[in-house]
Image: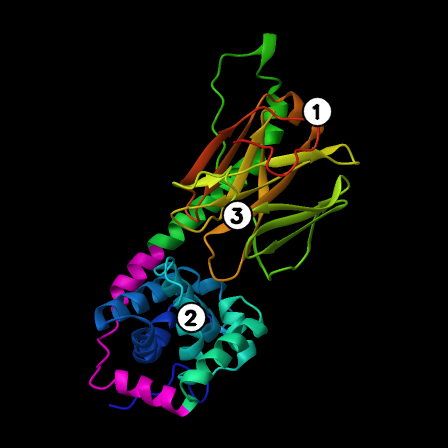
Amino acid sequence: MAYSPLRPACSPRVRPEDSDFAGYARDRWPRLVVTARLLAEDAGAAEELARRTLVRVYARWRRIPRNDVDFHVRRSLVRVYRRGRARRTDGRRRVVLVLRYWEGLGEAEIAQVLGCSVGAVRAVLRRAGKRVRAEERRAGFAAALAGFVPPAVPLDGVRRDGALRRRRRVGVVAAGCALLLAPPAVLAAGPLGGDGATGASKAPDGPAPGPVRIVSPGERVAAAPGVDVWLTSDGQHWSSPQASNRFRPVNDGNLDSTGACVSVQGEELDDGTYFQSGVYRGLSADPARVEIRTGGRTVTANVLTLAGSPGWGVWYARTPLAETVAGGGRTVTVYDAFGDVLMRSDLGPSVAQPVRVGAWRP
């Protein structure tokens, strides 16, 4: 049986209604499984990869632009595939080759799917082209699919698991909204601490969504007034009023190399706030939110990471100087997309002076 790439000659019409997911899934499932088969190691793994991809797509179906569904399907497929190969170095190379020589995507399109630079895609194709020609690569893919018959689409299971995933995500967002509405209620009720305490227990902080941004190596991000942060493959760089070029390597000996860990450093800024940042690594899943609690206040941090799920990233946030200095300690908590805690680290007392690179001990 001859197969065509996932990318059809023309995009099918998909109505906005949620029920149209079934028609889309039935139409694209065979091509999706075939592409997954070229990525995965066997037919069973390919079917599971394609199924998990549709689960993720169904969970976000109402929010996906109907003229861009294929892009979201490909991106979900690649993310699920690469997450399962977090410790393998050839994951991105395989994706680039399949997208280029099987699906026929251009370099810019591949870079968008992977969340990397066009130069990185060209480098992979250049190295691969020195070993195997494009025609031979396509022939090899076709040979790998000889005798492969896509199974029927497991539509009921996809919709069931996708609906569950959607409900869990909605629960996380609802809890975050409750947290945002909590401060006015607390102020209206009056202070709960000190001599005026009522004895009522304080409700735990609910999860709130936090931004996670994928950046290119060397791309500068304005993290605070006078503070720029940028990442390279070897760690975090930042420039602040205290120093023009500071660096925290991802393999810093101060970070625990035996499991999940996070670092922290901070300094006072000219506007009277306190800038805090750190490197995390070794987590069991991709972080969706990082919070830092200091001085009785919880602040949701920004998160930067490089494309391709490198297994580490950087968080940063600004906190009130007085509360940070007087808080007596800091707790950094990393959550996954479902609001589950990936890691929580109780850190030492806050400091008012800049912490030099390598001086901080979690």
| Residue 149 counted in the magenta span | yes
N-terminal-most mark, 2 or 1: 2
Residue 58 seen in this snapshot: no
Residue 308 seen in this snapshot: yes
Pointer 1 local density, CA inside 10 Å: few below 14, some 14–19, many at least 20: few
Name the kind of residue labelled 1 in the image: Ala
Task: List x then y, in percent, for residue 127.
Answer: 48, 78
Task: List x then y, in percent, for residue 254.
Answer: 51, 37
Task: List x then y, in percent, for residue 194.
Answer: 59, 11
The residue to which callout 1 is attached is 322
Name the kind of residue labelled 2 in the image: Val
Alpha carbon separation for disc pair 3 and 1: 30 Å
Query: Of helix, strand and loop, which one carries label 2?
Result: helix
Chosen colour scheme: rainbow
Query: Of helix, strand and loop, which one carries label 1?
Result: helix
Q: Principal SS element in the magenta part? A: helix
Which quadrant would the N terminus be assigned to in this image?
bottom left
> Which residue corresponds to the image point at 43% horizontal and 68% vertical from the top-left?
92
N-terminal-most mark, 3 or 1: 3
Alpha carbon separation for disc pair 2 and 1: 47 Å
| Residue 139 counted in the magenta span | yes
Look at discs 3 and 1 and give the one toward the viewer: 3
Vertical placement of residue 168 versus 327, above or below: below
Q: Which residue is more in the foreground, 183 or 93?
A: 93
Task: List x then y, in percent, for residue 265.
Answer: 61, 36
The residue to which callout 2 is attached is 73
The residue to which callout 3 is attached is 250
In the picture, measured across the screen, residue 98 lies left or right of residue 196, that is left
Vertical placement of residue 345 versus 113, above or below: above
N-terminal-most mark, 3 or 2: 2
* Span shown in magenta: 135-163
